[in-house]
Amino acid sequence: MKLTKKSHSCVRLQKDGQTLVIDPGGFSEEDAAVGADAILVTHEHPDHFNEERLRAGMEANPGAHIWTLKSVAEQVAAAFPGRVHTVGHGDTFTAAGFDVQVHGELHAVIHPDIPRITNVGYLVEGGDGGTVFHPGDALTVPDHPVETLMLPVMAPWNKIAEVIDYVREVKPRRAYDIHDALLTDLARPIYDNQIGALGGTEHLRLVPGGHADL
């Protein structure tokens, strides 16, 4: 299984000639979803869900499908009849040849005065490549072993102590940074050093367009 990092929280997984894209949002490249056989969206915030990005991917491949929660599905289902699937916590499905489990229900707390929206994470089974978990905007701990954790390192809703404790609780074999578009180059070494030293697992970072074989 090949993992490719796109900007911010978007990642691409490829296996057996098929491509799965997660969260091609507005902070990601315009063609982030192009070439996808399946697209997963964790929630409705614009840095994770961008209708233009989705449309580009869906129009480029008439066989592509979207799996997402209700709040996003309601906004795009009419444009792609029969190609948008609504999922929630506990659901399982197969997309682009990957077996996927859905974990989580709510976005992390940004501030008590801001109502919480729905958010789901996706645990993607990659066969020999193990499992990859993308939590969206939450620190959800799936009830299943995680080989590769996509780690949201910097957001208005988290702090580095929470990020470190999240890695410790999930106990993945490795953790790759996502949700990093707002993280400056000055701050990256600090995050790398602290998460790497205290997280208890291999902490890794890919530049946009970089890839790794899992």
Image: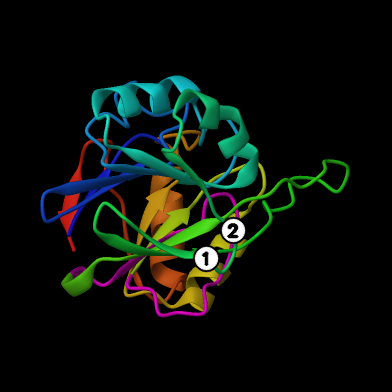
How far is mark 1 from mark 2, CA to CA? Answer: 6 Å
Categorize mark 1 by other alpha carbons within 10 Å: few (<14), some (14-19), many (20+).
few
Q: Residue at x 38, y 65 (%)?
A: 196
Q: Residue at x 26, y 72 (%)?
A: 130
Q: In the figure, residue 12 lies in which quadrant?
A: top left
Residue 197 spot, x, y in % from top left: 41, 69
Magenta residue check for 144: yes
81 or 170: which is nearer to us?
A: 81
The segment highlighted magenta reads 129-147
- Residue 88: numbered disc: 2
**Residue pushed farthest right?**
113
Are circles 1 and 2 on residues that touch, CB within 8 Å? yes
Residue 26 spot, x, y in % from top left: 47, 25
Hey, what amino acid is under mark 2? Gly
Return the residue at label 1: 91
212 or 91: which is nearer to us?
A: 91
Q: Residue at x 53, y 47 (%)?
A: 42
Compared to 116, does 55 lie above or below? above
Magenta residue check for 183: no
- Report helix, strand or loop for mark 1: loop
**Residue pushed farthest front?**
82
* Residue 23 in view of the camera: yes
Residue 204 spot, x, y in % from top left: 30, 58
64 or 122: which is nearer to us?
A: 64
